[in-house]
Amino acid sequence: MISNGSFHRSGSIPLSAFVLLLLAAPLFIQPLAGAQEAGVRDAPSNEHRAIDFFVMELPDSEGDGFEPHIVAGPGVSGGEWLYIDSPTGIGGGQSGNLWISKDHGDTWEAHDYGRNALGSGDSYTAIASDGTIYYTDLYLWSSTIDTSKDGGDTWIRNPLATVTRVGDRQWLAMGPTVGTFPGAQSETLYMIYNDIPQGLVIQRSQWSSRGLMWTMGNHRTPVTSSVGSRDHFAVDQNDGTIYLPNKDGGGIAIYVSTDGADSFSRYQVLTTDEDVQNIFIAADVDDEGNVYLAWSTQEHVFLGVSTDKARTWSITRVTDTDGTRVMPWVTVGDPGRVALTWYDTPETNGTSDEITDADWGAYAAITTDALSENVSFLITPILDYVHTGGIRTTGTGGNADRDLGDFFTCDVDEMGRLIVTFGNDGDDGPGARKSKVMFAKQLESPFMKEGVGPVAFFENETHGLTVRVDASGSYDMNGKGISAYLWDWGDGTNSTGIRSEHTFERGGAYDISLKVINMDDMRSTLTRNITVTAHEKAGGGAVLYIIVPLGMIMLGAALYIWYRKRKASGGIEEVRVKGT
């Protein structure tokens, strides 16, 4: 079966059309390497707070918000470019979509790189260090690799890129070439895919910088014989180690190659009877070689971390509230700084395929301490509403809405910001094919790299109901300076300025927040709970005010003087004053 439903826009295609294409091949299963499983732990102290994102709809993208993928990479003219791709569907005669941004996602340009009569069932891009773009499309019996060395203006196509027939859900990744041999380039382009009769296949292009020449890895045998294998993979950008996670039997396994895909070792990540493939298990590697995996059991999102090349794992349940979560992805910035994204709804009365009246949002979890013993996350909406209805996680099977496809992705830009692309079709109904491609860029800390962005700080003093604040201790780690100081007094009022003051109408405790914005539109927020009182006295204690009429004061003074005179003459011992 086509497990991830790559042919989502084809018509009715008989199964015999595929069977005629199958080639007999030997099955191969690698032996299990020694591994130690860890128990699943909960994040001890998550923070739930909405942080700022820049969100926009890509131009001319209605109907194309199916499985969008984003990658930050070099541009051919220098600097960093952002690339977003999404498929257009088999049978439409059109290659997949590609948008490019050269200004960190503020504006986007669509690139039409030619018509492909076979269509685009699945798409994915990879970017080389010199800005070469590799774009893969899936069609009925193979995959194309289109290569552009001029920023997407012209392309060279390899229409038969896969080395075996009937590939499904192909992924691309660049990595340093491992080993030395004549004619090899410094970087290797890898492709993995699910060969329907054989299992998970990996191939590599090491001799052609245009993706025209390919060899099959793992001694020309599948990495695993599971025909349900189609999960994501990652390559260490320093030593070239390849990591292929997969739902394998009763849990999650990961296949690791340290020799450029010549051979693989298998390690167990997790043993469980739960469904952990909703839809793909995603992977990433940081600059120190730590490996990160993300998956969902529908109820919760999980993060797996390995610091020893996938031999042992620590696993944390990321989410801590009731809900349904599907299509998780993971990306990493500096070591330990990890972000996960997924579609989320608070509804729990069934699977994502069954809750057809649910409202969904795109969510993210960010941590700066994924390598610590006690991992905690900031969980925030990216866009709190993107879809109404079910979300199918069963590939082409079932009746649930599949307009969002099977995944959406995230990455980190050069400034340490989380960048995300996802689909947004609102309440258009199943099969309407009106999903739009969305782009989101994180604006507010915590960022994915250390030492970037502004830092909010303020001093405060209180005088009765008045609070005075001074934010001159805030600073910008980007070195360009703070452009705005925004105060939220916690009572529905706001102000601006590096220094400010505010008088509250009544005493109490208030959450006073400072948000600072730097010249790169990156933001940081500091919140303090401050108590104000109606009246204060130095040294503490209450002050009692008694209001006495002036006439009473004068009468009392006169009587006192009279009394003192009479007492001095011995004529009276006591005076009693009655009444007022």
Image (tube, rainbow, N blue to C red):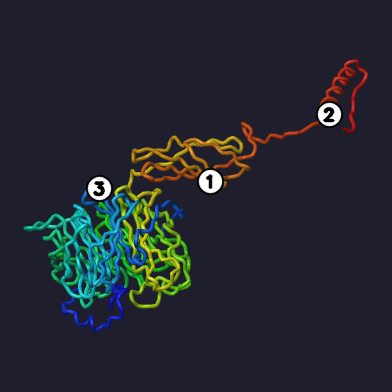
**Looking at the image, which residue is at 29% across and 71% down?**
89
* Label 1 – label 3 distance at C-alpha: 41 Å
Label placed on residue 328: none
> Are the residues tagged 1 and 2 within 8 Å (C-beta)?
no
Counting from the top left corner in percent of width and height, residue 304 is at 33, 61
Q: Residue furthest left?
A: 182
> Are the residues tagged 3 and 2 within 8 Å (C-beta)?
no
Image quadrant where one finds the N terminus: bottom left
User: Residue 257 versus residue 460: which sits nearer the camera?
Assistant: 460
Label placed on residue 552: 2
**Looking at the image, which residue is at 43% across and 58% down?**
383
Q: Quadrant for residue 480, please give it.
A: top left
Counting residues from the start of the chain, the first of labels 3 and 2 encountered is 3
Q: Amino acid at mark 2?
A: Met
Mark 2 is surrounded, within 10 Å at the Cα level, by few (under 14), some (14 to 19) or many (20 or more) other residues, namely few
Q: Amino acid at mark 1?
A: Asp
Is 128 situated above or below 568? below
Residue denoted by label 1: 511
Q: Quadrant for residue 169, please give it.
A: bottom left
Q: Secondary structure at mark 3?
A: loop
Counting residues from the start of the chain, the first of labels 1 and 3 encountered is 3
Counting from the top left corner in percent of width and height, residue 42 is at 41, 60
User: Residue 92 versus residue 291: which sits nearer the camera?
Assistant: 92
Counting from the top left corner in percent of width and height, residue 105 is at 33, 52
Please indicate, yes or no, whether residue 45 appears anywhere in the rendered image: no
Counting residues from the start of the chain, the first of labels 1 and 2 encountered is 1
Mark 1 is surrounded, within 10 Å at the Cα level, by few (under 14), some (14 to 19) or many (20 or more) other residues, namely some
Image quadrant where one finds the C terminus: top right
User: Residue 471 versus residue 89: which sits nearer the camera?
Assistant: 89
Label placed on residue 79: 3
> Are the residues tagged 1 and 3 within 8 Å (C-beta)?
no
Q: Secondary structure at mark 1?
A: strand
